[in-house]
Amino acid sequence: MSASPLETLQRVFGYDSFRGDQKAIIEHVVHGGDALVLMPTGGGKSLCYQIPALVRSGTGVVVSPLIALMQDQVDALIELGVKAAYLNSSQDWRTARDVEHAFLAGDLDLLYVAPERLLTDRCMDMLTQGRVSLFAIDEAHCVSQWGHDFRPEYLGLSVLHERWPDVPRLALTATATAATRREIAQRLELNEAPHFVASFDRPNIQYRIVEKNEVRKQLLSFIRAEHEGDCGIVYCLSRARVEETATFLCDNGIPALPYHAGLSAAVRAQNQARFLREEGVVMVATIAFGMGVNKPDVRFVAHIDLPKSVEGYYQETGRAGRDGLPATAWLAYGLQDVVQQRRMINESAGDEAFRRRLGSQLDAMLGLCETVGCRRERLLAYFDQQIEPCGNCDTCLEPPQAWDGTVAAQKILSAVYRLWRERGQRFGAGHLIDILRGKSTDRITQYGHETLSVFGIGADLSEQAWRGVLRQLLAQSLLAVDHEGYGTLALTDGSRAVLKGEHKLMFRREPEKKARGSSRAAGARAKAPVLDLPAEAQRRFEGLRAWRSEVARGHGVPAYVIFHDATLREIAMQCPQTLDDLGRVSGVGARKLEAYGEEILRCLGLC
Protein backbone atom coordinates (compact mmCIF):
# COMPACT_ATOMS: atom_id res chain seq x y z
CA MET A 1 0.00 0.00 0.00
CA SER A 2 1.04 3.61 -0.60
CA ALA A 3 -0.27 6.54 1.48
CA SER A 4 -3.08 6.08 3.98
CA PRO A 5 -6.70 6.80 2.94
CA LEU A 6 -6.79 10.05 4.95
CA GLU A 7 -3.48 11.25 3.48
CA THR A 8 -4.80 10.45 -0.01
CA LEU A 9 -8.04 12.34 0.68
CA GLN A 10 -6.13 15.42 1.79
CA ARG A 11 -3.37 15.38 -0.81
CA VAL A 12 -5.35 14.40 -3.93
CA PHE A 13 -8.85 15.68 -3.25
CA GLY A 14 -8.11 18.56 -0.88
CA TYR A 15 -10.59 17.61 1.88
CA ASP A 16 -9.64 17.54 5.54
CA SER A 17 -11.76 14.64 6.73
CA PHE A 18 -14.20 11.93 5.67
CA ARG A 19 -17.97 12.31 5.87
CA GLY A 20 -20.43 9.83 7.35
CA ASP A 21 -19.62 6.21 6.54
CA GLN A 22 -16.87 7.02 4.02
CA LYS A 23 -14.02 6.19 6.40
CA ALA A 24 -15.51 2.83 7.44
CA ILE A 25 -16.32 1.85 3.84
CA ILE A 26 -12.90 2.82 2.52
CA GLU A 27 -10.98 1.02 5.26
CA HIS A 28 -13.16 -2.08 4.76
CA VAL A 29 -12.43 -2.16 1.02
CA VAL A 30 -8.75 -1.27 1.39
CA HIS A 31 -8.40 -4.41 3.52
CA GLY A 32 -10.06 -6.56 0.85
CA GLY A 33 -13.73 -6.57 1.89
CA ASP A 34 -16.81 -6.45 -0.34
CA ALA A 35 -19.50 -3.86 0.32
CA LEU A 36 -22.94 -2.67 -0.75
CA VAL A 37 -23.07 1.12 -0.43
CA LEU A 38 -26.20 3.27 -0.40
CA MET A 39 -25.41 6.95 -0.32
CA PRO A 40 -27.50 9.83 -1.67
CA THR A 41 -26.43 11.75 -4.75
CA GLY A 42 -23.80 14.24 -3.71
CA GLY A 43 -22.92 12.20 -0.63
CA GLY A 44 -19.45 11.21 -1.84
CA LYS A 45 -19.97 7.67 -3.19
CA SER A 46 -17.17 7.97 -5.73
CA LEU A 47 -14.54 8.52 -3.03
CA CYS A 48 -15.52 5.13 -1.59
CA TYR A 49 -13.86 3.40 -4.54
CA GLN A 50 -11.49 6.06 -5.84
CA ILE A 51 -9.44 6.26 -2.64
CA PRO A 52 -9.13 2.46 -2.18
CA ALA A 53 -8.07 2.24 -5.85
CA LEU A 54 -5.31 4.77 -5.15
CA VAL A 55 -4.22 3.06 -1.94
CA ARG A 56 -4.33 -0.58 -3.08
CA SER A 57 -1.93 -2.08 -5.62
CA GLY A 58 -3.27 -2.43 -9.15
CA THR A 59 -6.05 -0.69 -11.08
CA GLY A 60 -9.55 -0.04 -9.82
CA VAL A 61 -12.11 -1.09 -12.46
CA VAL A 62 -15.34 0.94 -12.38
CA VAL A 63 -18.42 -0.44 -14.11
CA SER A 64 -20.53 2.51 -15.27
CA PRO A 65 -23.71 2.31 -17.41
CA LEU A 66 -23.38 5.58 -19.33
CA ILE A 67 -20.48 5.92 -21.75
CA ALA A 68 -21.37 9.54 -22.48
CA LEU A 69 -20.40 10.54 -18.94
CA MET A 70 -17.21 8.53 -18.54
CA GLN A 71 -15.08 11.17 -20.24
CA ASP A 72 -16.15 13.87 -17.76
CA GLN A 73 -15.48 11.55 -14.82
CA VAL A 74 -12.05 10.69 -16.17
CA ASP A 75 -11.27 14.34 -17.01
CA ALA A 76 -12.07 15.31 -13.42
CA LEU A 77 -9.68 12.66 -12.07
CA ILE A 78 -6.91 13.67 -14.46
CA GLU A 79 -7.25 17.27 -13.22
CA LEU A 80 -6.55 15.86 -9.74
CA GLY A 81 -3.41 14.10 -10.97
CA VAL A 82 -5.00 10.64 -10.95
CA LYS A 83 -4.05 8.27 -13.79
CA ALA A 84 -7.48 7.41 -15.17
CA ALA A 85 -8.91 6.20 -18.48
CA TYR A 86 -12.03 4.58 -19.92
CA LEU A 87 -12.91 1.90 -22.44
CA ASN A 88 -16.14 2.19 -24.40
CA SER A 89 -17.57 2.07 -27.90
CA SER A 90 -16.98 5.80 -28.51
CA GLN A 91 -13.23 5.21 -28.98
CA ASP A 92 -11.42 4.15 -32.15
CA TRP A 93 -9.37 0.97 -32.01
CA ARG A 94 -6.04 2.79 -31.62
CA THR A 95 -7.20 4.74 -28.57
CA ALA A 96 -8.70 1.60 -27.03
CA ARG A 97 -5.45 -0.30 -27.68
CA ASP A 98 -3.42 2.42 -25.94
CA VAL A 99 -5.71 2.24 -22.90
CA GLU A 100 -5.39 -1.55 -22.81
CA HIS A 101 -1.59 -1.30 -22.97
CA ALA A 102 -1.59 1.27 -20.14
CA PHE A 103 -3.67 -1.08 -18.00
CA LEU A 104 -1.45 -4.07 -18.68
CA ALA A 105 1.64 -1.98 -17.91
CA GLY A 106 0.16 -1.01 -14.53
CA ASP A 107 0.04 2.66 -15.49
CA LEU A 108 -3.60 3.28 -14.51
CA ASP A 109 -5.11 3.99 -11.10
CA LEU A 110 -8.70 3.76 -12.37
CA LEU A 111 -10.31 2.31 -15.49
CA TYR A 112 -13.98 3.00 -16.32
CA VAL A 113 -15.75 0.35 -18.42
CA ALA A 114 -19.33 -0.02 -19.64
CA PRO A 115 -20.91 -3.33 -18.52
CA GLU A 116 -21.43 -4.61 -22.06
CA ARG A 117 -17.75 -3.89 -22.85
CA LEU A 118 -16.56 -5.47 -19.62
CA LEU A 119 -18.29 -8.76 -20.40
CA THR A 120 -16.61 -9.24 -23.81
CA ASP A 121 -13.99 -11.97 -24.09
CA ARG A 122 -11.35 -9.40 -25.09
CA CYS A 123 -11.89 -7.28 -21.98
CA MET A 124 -12.10 -10.27 -19.64
CA ASP A 125 -8.85 -11.65 -21.01
CA MET A 126 -7.18 -8.25 -20.60
CA LEU A 127 -8.31 -7.96 -16.98
CA THR A 128 -7.02 -11.49 -16.29
CA GLN A 129 -3.57 -10.53 -17.59
CA GLY A 130 -3.34 -7.31 -15.54
CA ARG A 131 -3.73 -6.54 -11.86
CA VAL A 132 -7.13 -5.40 -10.60
CA SER A 133 -7.24 -3.72 -7.18
CA LEU A 134 -11.05 -3.65 -6.92
CA PHE A 135 -14.30 -3.71 -8.90
CA ALA A 136 -16.76 -0.86 -8.32
CA ILE A 137 -20.25 -1.46 -9.75
CA ASP A 138 -21.79 2.00 -9.98
CA GLU A 139 -25.57 2.56 -10.30
CA ALA A 140 -26.02 -0.95 -8.91
CA HIS A 141 -29.82 -0.61 -8.77
CA CYS A 142 -29.69 -1.31 -12.53
CA VAL A 143 -29.33 -5.01 -11.67
CA SER A 144 -32.75 -5.09 -10.01
CA GLN A 145 -35.52 -6.29 -12.30
CA TRP A 146 -38.06 -4.76 -9.89
CA GLY A 147 -36.21 -1.46 -9.77
CA HIS A 148 -36.94 1.74 -11.68
CA ASP A 149 -34.03 1.53 -14.14
CA PHE A 150 -33.28 -2.13 -14.94
CA ARG A 151 -30.39 -2.79 -17.36
CA PRO A 152 -30.20 -6.42 -18.58
CA GLU A 153 -26.43 -6.25 -19.14
CA TYR A 154 -25.94 -5.81 -15.38
CA LEU A 155 -27.15 -9.37 -14.78
CA GLY A 156 -23.86 -10.72 -16.16
CA LEU A 157 -21.75 -8.96 -13.53
CA SER A 158 -21.95 -11.90 -11.13
CA VAL A 159 -19.08 -13.31 -13.21
CA LEU A 160 -16.72 -10.92 -11.41
CA HIS A 161 -17.06 -12.91 -8.21
CA GLU A 162 -16.51 -16.16 -10.08
CA ARG A 163 -13.42 -15.01 -12.02
CA TRP A 164 -11.83 -12.83 -9.30
CA PRO A 165 -12.98 -14.22 -5.94
CA ASP A 166 -10.18 -12.45 -4.03
CA VAL A 167 -10.71 -8.96 -5.52
CA PRO A 168 -13.00 -6.72 -3.42
CA ARG A 169 -16.23 -5.59 -5.06
CA LEU A 170 -18.38 -2.58 -4.20
CA ALA A 171 -21.93 -2.15 -5.42
CA LEU A 172 -22.97 1.51 -5.15
CA THR A 173 -26.29 3.27 -5.65
CA ALA A 174 -28.16 6.34 -4.46
CA THR A 175 -31.58 4.69 -4.56
CA ALA A 176 -32.75 1.33 -3.24
CA THR A 177 -35.41 0.07 -0.86
CA ALA A 178 -34.60 -2.84 1.45
CA ALA A 179 -36.10 -5.23 -1.12
CA THR A 180 -33.99 -3.76 -3.92
CA ARG A 181 -30.86 -4.02 -1.75
CA ARG A 182 -31.54 -7.71 -1.17
CA GLU A 183 -31.93 -8.24 -4.90
CA ILE A 184 -28.67 -6.38 -5.65
CA ALA A 185 -26.80 -8.53 -3.12
CA GLN A 186 -28.29 -11.73 -4.49
CA ARG A 187 -27.70 -11.01 -8.18
CA LEU A 188 -24.14 -9.74 -7.68
CA GLU A 189 -23.29 -12.50 -5.18
CA LEU A 190 -22.63 -10.02 -2.39
CA ASN A 191 -24.64 -12.00 0.15
CA GLU A 192 -21.90 -11.82 2.81
CA ALA A 193 -21.05 -8.16 2.18
CA PRO A 194 -22.03 -5.59 4.80
CA HIS A 195 -24.57 -2.93 3.78
CA PHE A 196 -23.52 0.65 4.42
CA VAL A 197 -26.72 2.69 4.30
CA ALA A 198 -26.34 6.45 4.70
CA SER A 199 -29.18 8.83 5.38
CA PHE A 200 -31.38 9.43 2.34
CA ASP A 201 -32.09 12.97 3.45
CA ARG A 202 -31.02 15.83 1.18
CA PRO A 203 -31.87 18.79 3.43
CA ASN A 204 -30.71 21.36 0.86
CA ILE A 205 -33.48 20.29 -1.56
CA GLN A 206 -36.90 21.88 -1.12
CA TYR A 207 -39.64 19.47 -2.30
CA ARG A 208 -42.74 21.08 -3.80
CA ILE A 209 -45.76 19.55 -5.54
CA VAL A 210 -48.37 21.76 -7.20
CA GLU A 211 -51.68 21.01 -8.88
CA LYS A 212 -51.49 21.15 -12.66
CA ASN A 213 -53.07 24.14 -14.34
CA GLU A 214 -51.58 24.91 -17.78
CA VAL A 215 -48.38 23.17 -16.81
CA ARG A 216 -45.97 24.73 -19.31
CA LYS A 217 -46.98 28.21 -18.15
CA GLN A 218 -46.59 27.06 -14.55
CA LEU A 219 -43.12 25.76 -15.35
CA LEU A 220 -42.11 29.00 -17.04
CA SER A 221 -43.42 31.03 -14.10
CA PHE A 222 -41.51 28.83 -11.65
CA ILE A 223 -38.22 29.17 -13.56
CA ARG A 224 -38.56 32.93 -14.07
CA ALA A 225 -39.56 33.63 -10.47
CA GLU A 226 -36.99 31.45 -8.72
CA HIS A 227 -34.35 30.09 -11.11
CA GLU A 228 -33.76 32.63 -13.86
CA GLY A 229 -30.32 31.90 -15.32
CA ASP A 230 -29.90 28.69 -13.33
CA CYS A 231 -29.05 25.26 -14.64
CA GLY A 232 -31.93 22.77 -14.32
CA ILE A 233 -33.53 19.58 -15.57
CA VAL A 234 -37.17 19.20 -16.64
CA TYR A 235 -38.51 15.63 -16.86
CA CYS A 236 -41.38 14.66 -19.19
CA LEU A 237 -43.08 11.34 -19.81
CA SER A 238 -42.96 11.30 -23.63
CA ARG A 239 -40.58 12.32 -26.40
CA ALA A 240 -43.21 14.59 -27.98
CA ARG A 241 -43.71 16.41 -24.68
CA VAL A 242 -39.94 16.87 -24.36
CA GLU A 243 -39.74 18.52 -27.79
CA GLU A 244 -42.80 20.71 -27.20
CA THR A 245 -41.59 21.86 -23.79
CA ALA A 246 -38.03 22.60 -24.91
CA THR A 247 -39.37 24.66 -27.83
CA PHE A 248 -41.80 26.50 -25.54
CA LEU A 249 -39.04 27.42 -23.08
CA CYS A 250 -36.71 28.58 -25.87
CA ASP A 251 -39.49 30.69 -27.38
CA ASN A 252 -39.84 32.35 -23.99
CA GLY A 253 -36.17 33.15 -23.54
CA ILE A 254 -35.06 30.13 -21.47
CA PRO A 255 -32.08 28.30 -23.07
CA ALA A 256 -33.41 24.73 -23.22
CA LEU A 257 -32.28 21.56 -24.97
CA PRO A 258 -34.20 18.30 -25.62
CA TYR A 259 -32.91 14.83 -24.72
CA HIS A 260 -34.68 11.54 -25.43
CA ALA A 261 -34.01 8.16 -27.02
CA GLY A 262 -35.57 9.22 -30.33
CA LEU A 263 -32.75 11.67 -31.03
CA SER A 264 -29.60 10.49 -32.77
CA ALA A 265 -26.65 9.54 -30.62
CA ALA A 266 -24.73 12.53 -32.00
CA VAL A 267 -27.46 15.02 -31.05
CA ARG A 268 -27.85 13.50 -27.57
CA ALA A 269 -24.09 13.69 -27.02
CA GLN A 270 -23.96 17.29 -28.26
CA ASN A 271 -26.85 18.42 -26.05
CA GLN A 272 -25.45 16.62 -23.03
CA ALA A 273 -22.04 18.21 -23.58
CA ARG A 274 -23.62 21.68 -23.73
CA PHE A 275 -25.58 21.00 -20.55
CA LEU A 276 -22.47 19.87 -18.70
CA ARG A 277 -20.14 22.57 -20.00
CA GLU A 278 -22.34 25.68 -20.22
CA GLU A 279 -23.96 27.59 -17.38
CA GLY A 280 -27.67 28.34 -17.22
CA VAL A 281 -28.80 25.60 -19.63
CA VAL A 282 -32.06 23.73 -18.94
CA MET A 283 -32.24 20.12 -20.15
CA VAL A 284 -35.75 18.90 -21.01
CA ALA A 285 -35.67 15.12 -21.03
CA THR A 286 -37.27 11.76 -20.56
CA ILE A 287 -35.79 9.52 -17.90
CA ALA A 288 -33.27 8.44 -20.57
CA PHE A 289 -31.19 11.37 -19.28
CA GLY A 290 -29.53 11.84 -15.96
CA MET A 291 -28.04 8.71 -14.46
CA GLY A 292 -24.48 9.42 -13.44
CA VAL A 293 -24.74 13.16 -14.16
CA ASN A 294 -22.29 14.66 -11.69
CA LYS A 295 -22.85 18.33 -12.53
CA PRO A 296 -22.86 19.88 -9.05
CA ASP A 297 -24.69 23.14 -9.74
CA VAL A 298 -28.09 21.91 -10.99
CA ARG A 299 -30.34 24.28 -9.05
CA PHE A 300 -33.70 22.67 -9.86
CA VAL A 301 -35.28 19.48 -11.12
CA ALA A 302 -38.85 19.82 -12.37
CA HIS A 303 -41.33 17.09 -13.31
CA ILE A 304 -44.27 18.07 -15.49
CA ASP A 305 -45.56 14.50 -15.57
CA LEU A 306 -46.03 12.16 -12.63
CA PRO A 307 -43.06 9.81 -12.03
CA LYS A 308 -43.93 6.11 -11.94
CA SER A 309 -42.33 5.39 -8.57
CA VAL A 310 -40.87 7.03 -5.47
CA GLU A 311 -37.51 5.43 -6.25
CA GLY A 312 -37.44 7.03 -9.69
CA TYR A 313 -38.57 10.37 -8.29
CA TYR A 314 -35.90 10.32 -5.59
CA GLN A 315 -33.19 9.36 -8.08
CA GLU A 316 -34.19 12.13 -10.49
CA THR A 317 -34.67 14.89 -7.94
CA GLY A 318 -31.34 13.94 -6.38
CA ARG A 319 -29.58 15.41 -9.40
CA ALA A 320 -30.33 18.86 -7.99
CA GLY A 321 -27.99 20.51 -5.51
CA ARG A 322 -25.14 18.01 -5.53
CA ASP A 323 -22.93 20.82 -4.25
CA GLY A 324 -24.97 21.03 -1.04
CA LEU A 325 -26.32 24.49 -1.87
CA PRO A 326 -30.09 25.21 -1.94
CA ALA A 327 -32.03 23.56 -4.77
CA THR A 328 -35.66 22.86 -5.67
CA ALA A 329 -37.52 19.67 -6.62
CA TRP A 330 -40.75 20.88 -8.28
CA LEU A 331 -43.52 18.58 -9.51
CA ALA A 332 -46.81 19.48 -11.21
CA TYR A 333 -49.41 16.75 -10.84
CA GLY A 334 -53.06 16.40 -11.80
CA LEU A 335 -56.03 14.15 -12.42
CA GLN A 336 -54.95 13.17 -15.93
CA ASP A 337 -51.60 11.94 -14.59
CA VAL A 338 -53.40 9.42 -12.39
CA VAL A 339 -55.72 8.30 -15.21
CA GLN A 340 -52.79 7.92 -17.61
CA GLN A 341 -50.58 6.00 -15.18
CA ARG A 342 -53.39 3.63 -14.16
CA ARG A 343 -54.17 2.98 -17.82
CA MET A 344 -50.50 2.33 -18.64
CA ILE A 345 -50.34 -0.25 -15.84
CA ASN A 346 -53.50 -1.96 -17.12
CA GLU A 347 -52.04 -2.13 -20.62
CA SER A 348 -48.49 -3.11 -19.61
CA ALA A 349 -46.92 -6.38 -20.68
CA GLY A 350 -46.17 -8.92 -17.98
CA ASP A 351 -48.16 -11.07 -15.60
CA GLU A 352 -50.55 -10.02 -12.86
CA ALA A 353 -47.78 -9.97 -10.23
CA PHE A 354 -45.81 -7.51 -12.36
CA ARG A 355 -48.82 -5.22 -12.73
CA ARG A 356 -49.47 -5.41 -8.99
CA ARG A 357 -45.89 -4.34 -8.36
CA LEU A 358 -46.28 -1.37 -10.71
CA GLY A 359 -49.55 -0.52 -9.00
CA SER A 360 -47.99 -0.53 -5.54
CA GLN A 361 -45.14 1.69 -6.75
CA LEU A 362 -47.67 4.15 -8.19
CA ASP A 363 -49.73 4.05 -4.99
CA ALA A 364 -46.65 5.11 -3.00
CA MET A 365 -45.98 7.96 -5.42
CA LEU A 366 -49.59 9.11 -5.22
CA GLY A 367 -49.41 8.96 -1.43
CA LEU A 368 -46.44 11.33 -1.54
CA CYS A 369 -48.38 13.73 -3.76
CA GLU A 370 -51.57 13.67 -1.69
CA THR A 371 -50.06 13.77 1.80
CA VAL A 372 -51.08 16.58 4.12
CA GLY A 373 -47.95 15.95 6.19
CA CYS A 374 -44.28 16.69 5.58
CA ARG A 375 -43.18 15.66 2.06
CA ARG A 376 -39.65 14.80 3.17
CA GLU A 377 -40.95 12.72 6.08
CA ARG A 378 -43.17 10.72 3.68
CA LEU A 379 -40.39 10.39 1.08
CA LEU A 380 -37.81 9.07 3.53
CA ALA A 381 -40.32 6.74 5.18
CA TYR A 382 -40.48 4.92 1.83
CA PHE A 383 -36.81 4.05 2.37
CA ASP A 384 -37.46 3.04 6.01
CA GLN A 385 -35.93 6.22 7.44
CA GLN A 386 -37.78 8.19 10.11
CA ILE A 387 -37.34 11.95 10.55
CA GLU A 388 -39.21 14.84 12.13
CA PRO A 389 -41.07 17.29 9.84
CA CYS A 390 -38.41 19.16 7.88
CA GLY A 391 -39.73 22.72 7.79
CA ASN A 392 -38.43 23.08 4.21
CA CYS A 393 -41.09 21.56 1.93
CA ASP A 394 -44.34 23.05 0.68
CA THR A 395 -46.54 21.22 3.19
CA CYS A 396 -44.36 22.35 6.11
CA LEU A 397 -44.08 25.95 4.89
CA GLU A 398 -47.78 26.21 4.05
CA PRO A 399 -49.69 23.33 5.73
CA PRO A 400 -52.64 22.24 3.56
CA GLN A 401 -56.12 21.82 4.98
CA ALA A 402 -57.87 18.48 5.21
CA TRP A 403 -61.63 18.20 4.74
CA ASP A 404 -64.26 15.49 5.06
CA GLY A 405 -64.84 14.45 1.46
CA THR A 406 -67.13 11.51 2.18
CA VAL A 407 -70.31 13.13 0.85
CA ALA A 408 -68.57 14.50 -2.23
CA ALA A 409 -67.12 11.05 -2.91
CA GLN A 410 -70.55 9.45 -2.52
CA LYS A 411 -71.99 11.88 -5.07
CA ILE A 412 -69.44 11.09 -7.73
CA LEU A 413 -69.47 7.35 -7.05
CA SER A 414 -73.28 7.46 -7.28
CA ALA A 415 -73.01 9.16 -10.68
CA VAL A 416 -70.67 6.42 -11.93
CA TYR A 417 -72.97 3.72 -10.51
CA ARG A 418 -76.16 5.15 -11.99
CA LEU A 419 -74.67 5.65 -15.44
CA TRP A 420 -73.51 2.04 -15.50
CA ARG A 421 -76.43 0.39 -13.70
CA GLU A 422 -79.25 2.31 -15.37
CA ARG A 423 -77.81 2.93 -18.84
CA GLY A 424 -74.79 0.69 -19.29
CA GLN A 425 -72.60 3.73 -19.88
CA ARG A 426 -69.16 4.80 -18.70
CA PHE A 427 -67.66 8.25 -19.10
CA GLY A 428 -64.47 10.11 -18.27
CA ALA A 429 -63.79 12.69 -15.60
CA GLY A 430 -64.86 15.82 -17.49
CA HIS A 431 -68.32 14.53 -18.35
CA LEU A 432 -68.94 13.29 -14.79
CA ILE A 433 -68.02 16.69 -13.39
CA ASP A 434 -70.38 18.41 -15.85
CA ILE A 435 -73.23 16.15 -14.69
CA LEU A 436 -72.57 16.85 -11.01
CA ARG A 437 -72.28 20.60 -11.55
CA GLY A 438 -75.46 20.66 -13.67
CA LYS A 439 -73.85 21.97 -16.88
CA SER A 440 -76.09 21.70 -19.96
CA THR A 441 -73.53 20.73 -22.58
CA ASP A 442 -74.31 19.31 -26.03
CA ARG A 443 -73.02 15.93 -24.88
CA ILE A 444 -75.22 15.87 -21.78
CA THR A 445 -78.24 16.77 -23.90
CA GLN A 446 -77.30 14.12 -26.49
CA TYR A 447 -77.34 11.37 -23.87
CA GLY A 448 -80.23 12.79 -21.84
CA HIS A 449 -78.12 12.98 -18.71
CA GLU A 450 -79.92 16.07 -17.43
CA THR A 451 -82.68 13.65 -16.32
CA LEU A 452 -80.36 11.74 -13.97
CA SER A 453 -81.09 12.12 -10.27
CA VAL A 454 -77.45 13.12 -9.70
CA PHE A 455 -77.58 15.97 -12.23
CA GLY A 456 -76.61 19.21 -10.47
CA ILE A 457 -76.14 17.74 -7.00
CA GLY A 458 -72.51 18.92 -6.94
CA ALA A 459 -72.99 22.56 -7.89
CA ASP A 460 -71.52 23.59 -4.54
CA LEU A 461 -67.99 22.61 -5.64
CA SER A 462 -65.94 24.15 -8.44
CA GLU A 463 -64.64 22.15 -11.38
CA GLN A 464 -61.14 22.34 -9.89
CA ALA A 465 -62.38 21.00 -6.56
CA TRP A 466 -64.19 18.10 -8.25
CA ARG A 467 -61.05 17.22 -10.19
CA GLY A 468 -59.24 17.07 -6.86
CA VAL A 469 -61.91 14.70 -5.48
CA LEU A 470 -61.67 12.45 -8.53
CA ARG A 471 -57.87 12.46 -8.41
CA GLN A 472 -57.82 11.42 -4.77
CA LEU A 473 -60.44 8.69 -5.32
CA LEU A 474 -58.26 7.30 -8.11
CA ALA A 475 -55.17 7.62 -5.92
CA GLN A 476 -56.87 5.53 -3.21
CA SER A 477 -58.19 2.98 -5.76
CA LEU A 478 -61.79 3.88 -4.92
CA LEU A 479 -62.31 4.52 -8.63
CA ALA A 480 -60.65 2.64 -11.47
CA VAL A 481 -59.69 3.41 -15.06
CA ASP A 482 -61.22 1.02 -17.58
CA HIS A 483 -59.11 -1.75 -19.09
CA GLU A 484 -60.06 -0.93 -22.68
CA GLY A 485 -57.90 2.18 -22.83
CA TYR A 486 -60.67 4.78 -23.21
CA GLY A 487 -59.99 6.55 -19.90
CA THR A 488 -63.52 6.03 -18.58
CA LEU A 489 -64.11 5.45 -14.89
CA ALA A 490 -65.57 2.48 -13.03
CA LEU A 491 -66.26 1.48 -9.42
CA THR A 492 -63.90 -0.78 -7.49
CA ASP A 493 -64.36 -3.24 -4.64
CA GLY A 494 -63.63 -0.41 -2.21
CA SER A 495 -66.35 1.87 -3.61
CA ARG A 496 -69.21 0.04 -1.89
CA ALA A 497 -68.02 0.89 1.65
CA VAL A 498 -67.87 4.59 0.74
CA LEU A 499 -71.35 4.55 -0.84
CA LYS A 500 -72.79 2.83 2.26
CA GLY A 501 -71.16 5.36 4.59
CA GLU A 502 -68.86 2.77 6.17
CA HIS A 503 -65.64 4.49 5.05
CA LYS A 504 -64.97 8.12 5.99
CA LEU A 505 -62.69 9.99 3.58
CA MET A 506 -60.46 12.92 4.50
CA PHE A 507 -59.16 14.76 1.46
CA ARG A 508 -56.44 17.32 0.87
CA ARG A 509 -58.03 20.68 0.04
CA GLU A 510 -56.45 22.31 -2.97
CA PRO A 511 -56.26 26.13 -2.95
CA GLU A 512 -58.35 27.70 -5.68
CA LYS A 513 -56.17 28.65 -8.66
CA LYS A 514 -53.43 30.66 -7.04
CA ALA A 515 -50.65 32.27 -9.06
CA ARG A 516 -49.20 29.74 -11.43
CA GLY A 517 -46.13 27.79 -10.50
CA SER A 518 -45.68 28.35 -6.78
CA SER A 519 -47.40 28.36 -3.45
CA ARG A 520 -47.36 31.48 -1.28
CA ALA A 521 -44.59 29.94 0.76
CA ALA A 522 -42.56 29.33 -2.37
CA GLY A 523 -43.28 32.79 -3.67
CA ALA A 524 -41.98 34.27 -0.44
CA ARG A 525 -38.55 32.83 -1.20
CA ALA A 526 -38.65 33.70 -4.90
CA LYS A 527 -35.16 34.12 -6.28
CA ALA A 528 -33.49 33.85 -2.91
CA PRO A 529 -29.77 33.98 -3.83
CA VAL A 530 -28.01 30.63 -3.60
CA LEU A 531 -24.74 32.32 -2.73
CA ASP A 532 -25.54 34.95 -0.13
CA LEU A 533 -22.06 36.43 -0.08
CA PRO A 534 -21.04 39.89 1.15
CA ALA A 535 -20.59 42.37 -1.70
CA GLU A 536 -16.77 42.18 -1.77
CA ALA A 537 -16.77 38.38 -1.63
CA GLN A 538 -19.46 38.25 -4.32
CA ARG A 539 -17.25 40.34 -6.62
CA ARG A 540 -14.30 38.01 -6.00
CA PHE A 541 -16.54 34.99 -6.59
CA GLU A 542 -17.73 36.31 -9.97
CA GLY A 543 -14.13 37.04 -10.95
CA LEU A 544 -13.09 33.50 -10.01
CA ARG A 545 -16.00 32.04 -12.01
CA ALA A 546 -14.93 34.04 -15.07
CA TRP A 547 -11.35 32.80 -14.65
CA ARG A 548 -12.59 29.22 -14.22
CA SER A 549 -14.67 29.44 -17.41
CA GLU A 550 -11.60 30.47 -19.43
CA VAL A 551 -9.52 27.63 -18.00
CA ALA A 552 -12.30 25.09 -18.61
CA ARG A 553 -12.69 26.17 -22.23
CA GLY A 554 -8.96 25.82 -22.73
CA HIS A 555 -8.98 22.30 -21.28
CA GLY A 556 -12.19 21.28 -23.07
CA VAL A 557 -13.90 20.25 -19.82
CA PRO A 558 -16.94 21.44 -17.81
CA ALA A 559 -16.21 24.32 -15.44
CA TYR A 560 -16.95 22.21 -12.34
CA VAL A 561 -14.10 19.85 -13.28
CA ILE A 562 -11.68 22.71 -12.54
CA PHE A 563 -13.33 23.74 -9.25
CA HIS A 564 -16.83 23.45 -7.79
CA ASP A 565 -18.76 26.61 -6.98
CA ALA A 566 -18.58 25.67 -3.29
CA THR A 567 -14.76 25.77 -3.44
CA LEU A 568 -14.71 29.11 -5.29
CA ARG A 569 -17.18 30.48 -2.77
CA GLU A 570 -14.90 29.55 0.11
CA ILE A 571 -11.89 31.07 -1.66
CA ALA A 572 -13.88 34.26 -2.24
CA MET A 573 -14.86 34.39 1.43
CA GLN A 574 -11.38 33.67 2.83
CA CYS A 575 -9.43 35.65 0.19
CA PRO A 576 -6.15 33.74 0.83
CA GLN A 577 -2.94 35.72 0.28
CA THR A 578 -0.44 32.84 0.02
CA LEU A 579 -0.29 29.38 -1.53
CA ASP A 580 -0.20 27.87 1.94
CA ASP A 581 -3.43 29.67 2.84
CA LEU A 582 -5.04 28.58 -0.44
CA GLY A 583 -4.00 24.97 0.15
CA ARG A 584 -6.08 24.93 3.34
CA VAL A 585 -9.32 25.62 1.43
CA SER A 586 -11.57 22.57 1.13
CA GLY A 587 -11.41 21.15 -2.39
CA VAL A 588 -7.93 22.45 -3.24
CA GLY A 589 -5.67 19.40 -3.46
CA ALA A 590 -1.94 19.30 -4.13
CA ARG A 591 -2.26 18.94 -7.91
CA LYS A 592 -4.73 21.80 -8.28
CA LEU A 593 -2.72 23.99 -5.95
CA GLU A 594 0.35 23.44 -8.11
CA ALA A 595 -1.55 23.92 -11.38
CA TYR A 596 -3.76 26.88 -10.49
CA GLY A 597 -2.55 28.39 -7.22
CA GLU A 598 -0.61 31.34 -8.64
CA GLU A 599 -3.39 32.13 -11.14
CA ILE A 600 -6.01 32.17 -8.37
CA LEU A 601 -3.93 34.52 -6.22
CA ARG A 602 -3.44 36.84 -9.20
CA CYS A 603 -7.17 36.72 -9.92
CA LEU A 604 -7.95 37.63 -6.31
CA GLY A 605 -5.51 40.51 -6.52
CA LEU A 606 -7.32 41.90 -9.55
CA CYS A 607 -10.82 41.55 -8.08
Image (spheres, grey):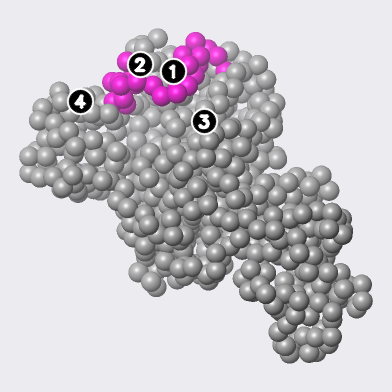
What type is the residue that disc 1 sits on?
A: Lys
What type is the residue that disc 3 sits on?
A: Ser
Q: According to the image, label 2 marks what residue? A: 6
Residue 463 can be seen in this image: yes
Image location (x, y in percent) of residue 586: 27, 29
Q: Counting residues from the N terminus, which is met first, the one under dot 2 or under dot 1?
A: 2
Characterize the local packing of mark 4: few (<14), some (14-19) or many (20 or more) Cα atoms within 10 angstroms. Answer: many
Q: Quadrant of residue 459?
A: bottom right
Q: Counting residues from the N terminus, which is met first, the one under dot 4 or under dot 1?
A: 1
Are dots 2 and 1 in contact, CB under 8 Å? yes
Are dots 1 and 3 in contact, CB under 8 Å? no
Q: According to the image, label 1 marks what residue? A: 23
Q: Mark on residue 199?
A: 3
Which contiguous range is marked in magenta?
6-34
Q: Secondary structure at mark 4?
A: helix
What type is the residue that disc 2 sits on?
A: Leu
